[in-house]
Image (tube, rainbow, N blue to C red):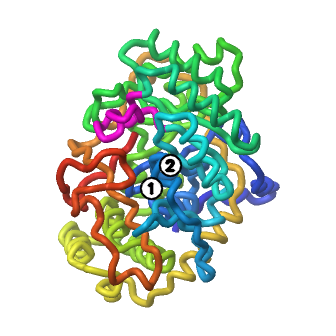
Amino acid sequence: MSRSTPPALEGERAPKRQKLGHLTHDSFKNGVFLAPMVRSGALPTRLTALKHGASLVWGPEIVDKAILHTERVVDPHTGVVSYHGKTRAIFTTHPIEKPYLIYQIGSASPELAVQAAKSVVRDVSGIDLNCGCPKPFSTHSGMGAALLTNPDLLCAILTALRRELPPEITVSAKIRLLPTQEETKKLVERIIRTGVSALTVHCRTRNMRQREAALVNRLREIVEFVQGLGVDIAIIENGDCKGWEDARRVKRLTGASSVMIATAAEANPTCFSSTPLMDIETTLIPSYLRLSRYLNNHWALTKFCVSQFKAPRTERSKTEAHRFKTHIVAAKEYDGLTELVGEWTGEKDFADIVSAIEARRPRPLTVDAMPTDPDALEEARLTSTPPVRPNPEPPTSCAPLGPSTRSRMPLPAVITGSDAITPSPTPKAVSPFSVSRRS
């Protein structure tokens, strides 16, 4: 079983436990973070990532108007906090993740962004503005990557958030690279002058997709530019990092304060550990399913997340692993998987996560100096390009309202073809097992 932090060596004093206080500028430095991912950034995945060492976790992007018409409800048994819309929960969280949780907003309005942030501020530690989603459902309303070409609006939203939110709530933004370095640096300078605590740079341009290797090499110049401005702000790299150990390479190459992981975490949320789990059909998936059921995570959402899980195998054959996944895909509800998970002891699985999170100790991402040898430098520049994968429209969170509503729970947007979270309808239905969207 992977540990979130390594034990102290014999005779060595263990580091102090991390205090569960408010985030600061330093909270965004020397860490490895879970990226905001629609569907794949569900509550069970975030908790799993925290258990296995993620420094901070970003929730999936929620459009401002969607959260404004919700009712906050707390499950008295599990403690899960749900923001309910008319037919479903738009966002779910749990107090145990609050000290590490960043809520991401999709917005093109300073006023609406502030209202949306204030509606969830009691349950999160930071607010992040999505300025990188390149899909038409976001950009046509001026959100996401459209903000990259409207820096006045982008900065107005960040300025309003910083001015109106409590000082202990951090404000940050996530952008993509602009076509040229000069354009990117000009935008970065404007953003950091708004008072944000951190800026994540997805090292792809608006027109690039996941199958294309991230332009990681461009970030070092941007980091050095920010350092030259004398502003105390964390620059976070996003793009093609495979896990905690690989984050050292990325940090050394770019000089970034921290590294954010998306694709690799979607495949294996234990990648934040220095020893991520293998043979996940036995080491991860059963406990993930029990946890999801205990937290009342909607079955369709859980099925999607599990369908993305993939890791090296040492005990099972490829055929056995395929049969295992096929069984899950064919199931219509949690009860159909009793044969795979055994007893539904989700409360114990959750208790294990709580214990791991409460016992967290500082684990800064430290690296050696940038290599100067040409061969070593070239090796550091090597990146991993994900396989060809689609970029579908995001569905709803599919989180249930509770036992009384299960019989009339609407189909997810990936099946019905509409999505109230996004400002425009989904053009057509896509498979519920297609890949999640990341900004």
Q: Which residues are magenta?
A: 130-146
Q: Secondary structure at mark 1?
A: loop
Residue reaching furthest to the top: 182
- For the C terminus, give its image quadrant: top left
* Residue hosting label 1: 41
Check the image and report above or below for 264 versus 201: below
Tell me the kind of residue under disc 2: Leu
Nearer the observer, disc 2 or disc 1?
A: 1
Q: Residue at x 50, y 41 (%)?
A: 260
* Residue hosting label 2: 34
Q: Residue at x 66, y 33 (%)?
A: 197
Viewer-nearest residue: 63 or 179: 63
* Residues at discs 2 and 1 in contact (Cβ within 8 Å): yes
Does the image show residue 253? yes
Q: Secondary structure at mark 2?
A: strand
Check the image and report above or below for 325 versus 106: below
Is 245 contained in the magenta span?
no
Q: Earlier in the sequence, mark 2 or mark 1?
A: 2
Question: How many angstroms separate mark 2 from mark 1 (CA)?
Answer: 8 Å
Check the image and report above or below for 424 versus 216: below
Residues packed near mark 1 inside 10 Å, few (<14), some (14 to 19) or many (20 plus): many
Q: Residue at x 42, y 52 (%)?
A: 265
Position of residue 417 measured from the top left corner of the image (x, y, whole percent): 22, 57
- Picture quarter containing residue 252? top right
Position of residue 374 measured from the top left corner of the image (x, y, whole percent): 43, 16
Residues packed near mark 2 inside 10 Å, few (<14), some (14 to 19) or many (20 plus): many
- Picture quarter containing residue 26? top right
Does the image show residue 220? no
Q: Residue at x 31, y 71 (%)?
A: 410
